Amino acid sequence: MALVVRTPWTPDADIAGAFSSAAITYALLVPDSNYPSGGYSVTPGTFNLTTRILAFVPSSTSVGTSNYLPVFDPTSSTLRLFNMVSGAWSEVTAGTDLSTVQCNTAILGW
């Protein structure tokens, strides 16, 4: 199971400077064909940060009628993906093929 991260990435809209002194790095998140239970393991270094990830701010993340939300779980240091199911956000089921999903995202941290 692997998540491809392309950074630096030029985002759809420049939101740099909108958030305090935290560093902002941009990435295109490209999940694989086998979403792992609990999400993808990530570190600050994955996104060219040195100390800590604060949050992911998605710009555009949809495939067809499905919308995806990347969420950082600081307890397990994982990137978890959620989608809207019956009007509620739910984590993607382990084993789901997300290889056609691309998340244009800003990552805040240090």
Image: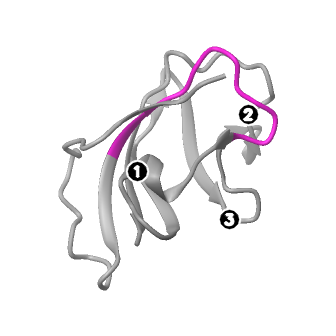
- Neighbor class of circle 3 (other Cα within 10 Å; few <14, some 14-19, many 20+) is some
Q: Residue at x 77, y 38 (%)?
A: 86
Q: Position of residue 92 (x, y in %)?
A: 73, 34
Q: Position of residue 61 (x, y in %)?
A: 45, 37
Q: Residue at x 40, y 50 (%)?
A: 47
Instruction: For marks 2 and 1, give the CA distance.
Output: 22 Å
Instruction: For marks 3 and 1, give the CA distance.
Output: 15 Å
Q: Which residues are magenta?
A: 27-39
Task: Say which of marks 3 and 2 sits in front.
Answer: 3
The image's mark for residue 47 is: 1
Report the magenta stretch's main SS.
Answer: loop
- Neighbor class of circle 2 (other Cα within 10 Å; few <14, some 14-19, many 20+) is many
Q: Residue at x 30, y 50 (%)?
A: 26
Q: Position of residue 36 (x, y in %)?
A: 75, 30
Name which quarter of the figure residue 40 lies in.
Answer: top right
- Of label 3 and label 1, which has the lower sequence position? 1
Helix, strand or loop at label 3? It is: loop
Q: Position of residue 9 (x, y in %)?
A: 24, 41
In the image, what residue type sits under mark 3?
Answer: Pro
The image's mark for residue 64 is: none
Q: Give 41 or 96, whichever is nearer the viewer.
A: 41
- Of label 3 and label 2, which has the lower sequence position? 3
- Of label 2 and label 1, which has the lower sequence position? 1
Q: Mark 3 highlights which residue?
A: 74
Position above or below: 40 against 52:
above
In the image, what residue type sits under mark 1?
Answer: Phe
Name which quarter of the figure residue 6 lies in.
Answer: top left
**What colouring style does the render use?**
one colour
Position above or below: 108 against 77:
below
In the image, what residue type sits under mark 2?
Answer: Val
